[in-house]
Amino acid sequence: MLIGPLVIWGCGGHAREVLHLCEQIGVLVIGFLDERPEYKGKVVDGLPVLGDLQDILHLKDQVRIVCAGVGDPFLKKHFVEKTTLLGFQPADSLIHPSIYLSNRNTIGKGTIICEGTILTTNVQVGNFVILNRGVILSHDDIIHDYATVSPGASIAGNVTVGEGATIGIGSSIREKVSIGAWSMIGGGSFVKGNVPPHTLYGGVPAIFKKNWP
C-alpha cells in the first residue's frame, strides 16, 4: 500500500508528470525538492519547492521521497543515495491504475510506470526505473535499476536493459539484444545489435556515436 504524503525530487517536467500520476492514483504530494538554492520557495504546479533534503529534516518520519522524479539515471542514483544517507524513506513504486501487471512480472521499489505502458509476460523491472508513457515491454525483458525508458519506446522480447541505461523517445529495440549499463539510445533509433556500456548509439540502424557520458 502506498504511504503518503510524498515529496518529489526535482521540479522540472518529469517531476511535474510524476505529480500528475500521483493525482491520478490519489496520493498526496506536499512539495518538490531541488538542490539548487535559487529554486527554494518557488511554486511549481501549485506546490512549493521545499529546498534540499536538509531543509525538511523535521519531516523525516512523516513523508516518503520520490527519487525517480528526474529522468537522468545518474541523478536518480544520486538522489537515492542521498535520501538513504539522510535517513529518509524512499516512496513505493507509482503505477498508473490502467496498467495490467501479471503475477509473472516483477517490479522493484521506487519505480514509475506511466499511463499507456504495456508489459506482457515474465518482465522484470528493477528499482527506481522510469517507464514513461506508451512504453512497450515484451516477454522476458529485464530492465535493471535506474534505467529510464522514454515515451513511446518499443522493446522486443528477451532484451536486457542494463543499469542506468536510457532508451530514447520513440526508439525500437529488436529481440535478444543487450543494452549496456549507463548507455544512451538516441530518440527514434532502431537497435539491432548489442550496445556496450557507457556508449551513445543512435540512428536507423543505431550505430556508435561516442562514449557516454
Image (cartoon, rainbow, N blue to C red):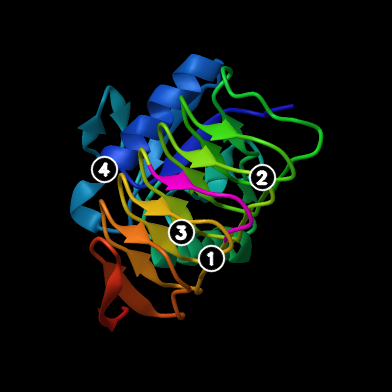
Total marks in image: 4
Determine whether the residue tagged by mark 1 lies in a helix, strand or loop.
loop
Residue occupied by mark 1: 177
The residue pinned by badge 2 equals 139
Magenta-highlighted residues: 153-159
Residue type for callout 2: His
Position in image of residue 31 (x %, y %): 40, 33
38 up-or-down from 59: above or below:
below
SS assignment at label 3? helix
From this viewpoint, which residue is outermost toward the right? 103
110 vs 197, nearest the viewer = 197
Alpha-carbon span between mark 1 and mark 3: 25 Å
Horizontal side of 5 relative to 185 (left or right) equals: right
Tell me what residue is drawn at x 74 percent, y 44 percent.
122
Mark 4, residue position: 12
28 within the magenta span: no
Alpha carbons under labels 3 and 2: distance apart:
26 Å
Identify the mark nearer the N-term, 4 or 1.
4
Q: Residue at x 64, y 56 (%)?
A: 158
- Residue most toward the left? 38
Which numbered disc flags the more N-terminal residue, 1 or 3? 3
Q: Which circle's residue, 1 or 2, is located before the other in the chain?
A: 2
Q: Mark 2: few, some, or many residues within 10 Å (few <14, many ≥20)?
A: some
For residue 88, above or below residue 62: below
Q: Amino acid at mark 3?
A: Lys
C-alpha span from label 3 to label 4: 14 Å
Q: Which mark is residue 84?
A: none
Label ID, residue 76: 3
Neighbours of disc 4 within 10 Å: few (<14), some (14-19), many (20+):
some
